Image (spheres, rainbow, N blue to C red):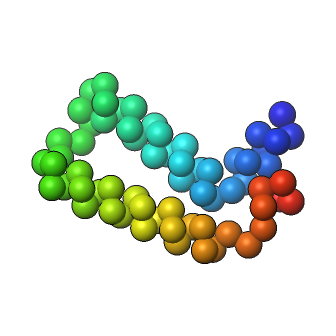
Amino acid sequence: MDRIKQALKSKTVQFSIGLAVLSILQGYIGFLPVHPAGQAIVGCIIASCIAVLRFVTTMPVSQK
């Protein structure tokens, strides 16, 4: 349980959980009516956010 609490302190993990929820919503109920080109742009934005979060990370999750 402590490992889960530590992981949830990570912004990267929080972003990933939000992304997973959005993906589930999109897959099952078509939450966002997005054209394939728009999906490509969203994918690039998500990849950029993950890269930025990785550079902002200063310590491993185990030390939080």
How many numbered marks have been drawn onto this rendered protein structure? 0
Residue 34 location (% of width, % of height) = 17, 46
Residue at 13 percent across and 48 percent down: it is 35
Residue at 35 percent across and 32 percent down: it is 25
Which residue in the rendered view is the most extreme toward the top? 28
Residue 62 location (% of width, % of height) = 84, 54
* Quarter placement of the C terminus: bottom right
* Quarter placement of the N terminus: top right
Locate residue 25 relative to residue 64 in the image: left or right.
Answer: left
Snapshot quadrant of residue 47: bottom left
Residue at 86 percent across and 40 percent down: it is 2
Residue at 52 percent across and 71 percent down: it is 52
Determine whether 58 is above or below 33 in the image: below
Residue 15 location (% of width, % of height) = 54, 53
Snapshot quadrant of residue 32: top left
Determine whether 28 is above or below 15 in the image: above
Locate residue 59 relative to residue 39 in the image: left or right.
Answer: right
Locate residue 10 relative to residue 20 in the image: left or right.
Answer: right
Residue 41 location (% of width, % of height) = 25, 61
Nearest the camera: 28 or 59? Answer: 59
